[in-house]
Amino acid sequence: MLFVDSIIKLVKLGIASSYLKDEKRKLNLILLGNPEVGKSTILLNFNFNKLKGVFVFTDLTKSTLEKFLKEMNNPKETVRYIIVPDFTILKSHQKEVEKGIIGILNSGVEDGLREITLHYGSVPETKPFEKPIFFGVATSMTRKFLEDRRRTGYWYSVGFLSRFIPISFSYSKEQIKAIRRYIAESKDLLEKPEELRLKEKVVKCSGKYVLMLEPYVDKLASASYTYGFRYTKQFRLMLKANALLRGSTRVGLKDVKDVEKLLKWVNLDYNQVE
C-alpha cells in the first residue's frame, strides 16, 4: 500500500505481541483517521490463514462473540488476537448489546475473561473457563466518531479506550493526488496479503529500554488524563514484539530505535504518513 508502511508495521507489532509466550496481555491498537484513509484496508492486509489464533470479525454481536470464545476455549485452539476492521459497527446494535460486547472485550484485553454466559432461549447459562482467556484487539474508527462523546462516552467511562494505543494518520495533498492517480489506473491499493510467520517465544526486556520511551508515555497520559501505567505496559509489549519480529529473544537498543520511529503516529495528532 502507498505511504503507509509505518502504520502496517504497527499493526504487525500488535499481532506479533500475541505470540509473546511470557506475556498474558497483548498490544491493543485503534487506527484513527478520516474516511477513506485506509484504516480497514490496513487491518486486513495480512494472510490470516497463516496466523493461528488471529481472527477477523466484520460484525460483532454479543451472542456470536460468546459462542466463538466458548468454542475456542480448548487445548487445541486458542484466541490470541481479534481484528475488527470498523468498530463503529457496534452502534448498529442496541445499547445493551453494545455494553455486553464492550464488557467481554474489556475483560479479555485486561484481566482475562473468566466465564461466558450463553443464552439458550430464555434460559441463560454461565460457563466458567478453566483459566482466564486473554486476547488482543486491533480496530479502527474515524476521527469524527472518536471525538463524538455522545457515541463514545460510555467507552471512555468504563476505561475501554484507555486500554488501546491510538494510531492516527493522514495524507498530504501530494500524497492524495498520487493515490488518486494510482486508482485512476485501476491499480489495487491492497497488494498481495502479507504473510507473517510467527512462533511463540519468550522475549526478555529490561525496564531501562521501556523508560527510554517515557516522554511518549507522558504525552499520551496527558492527552487521556491518566497516569500512563497502561501505556507503559503497552510500550513494553511493543518493544518485545519488535524483537520477536526480527528473530531476537531479547530487547535491545535497536528495538527502541525501531519503535521510536513509529511513535510519530502513536498519538492523536494525525500526522502525515511518509
Image (cartoon, rainbow, N blue to C red):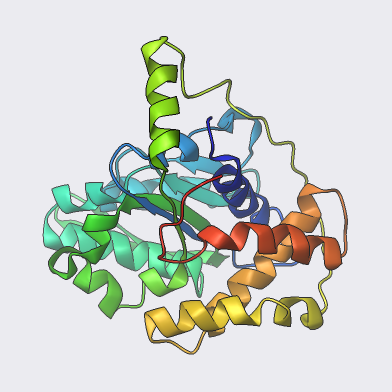
Residue 19 in percent (x, y) is at 70, 53
Question: Relative to 169, is 48 on the left or the right?
Answer: right
Whether residue 124 is visible here, answered yes or no, is no
Question: Relative to 223, is 157 on the left or the right?
Answer: left
- In this rendered view, identify the residue nearer to me: 272 or 17: 272
For the image shown, how many numbered marks are present on the structure? 0
In this picture, is 5 found above or below 69? above
- In this rendered view, identify the residue nearer to me: 23 or 196: 196
The outermost residue toward the bottom is 227
- Residue at image coords 44%, 52%: 169
In the rendered view of the protein, which quadrant contains the C terminus?
top right
- In this rendered view, identify the residue nearer to me: 180 or 268: 180
Which quarter of the figure has residue 25?
bottom right
Residue 130 in percent (x, y) is at 56, 65
The outermost residue toward the top is 185
- In this rendered view, identify the residue nearer to me: 222 or 30: 222
Residue 24 in percent (x, y) is at 64, 67
- Residue at image coords 53%, 79%: 230
Residue 114 in percent (x, y) is at 47, 69
Question: Relative to 132, is 247 on the left or the right?
Answer: right
In this picture, is 216 found above or below 16? below
Whether residue 177 is visible here, answered yes or no, is yes
In this picture, is 130 found above or below 33? below
- Residue at image coords 63%, 70%: 235
In this picture, is 178 found above or below 237? above
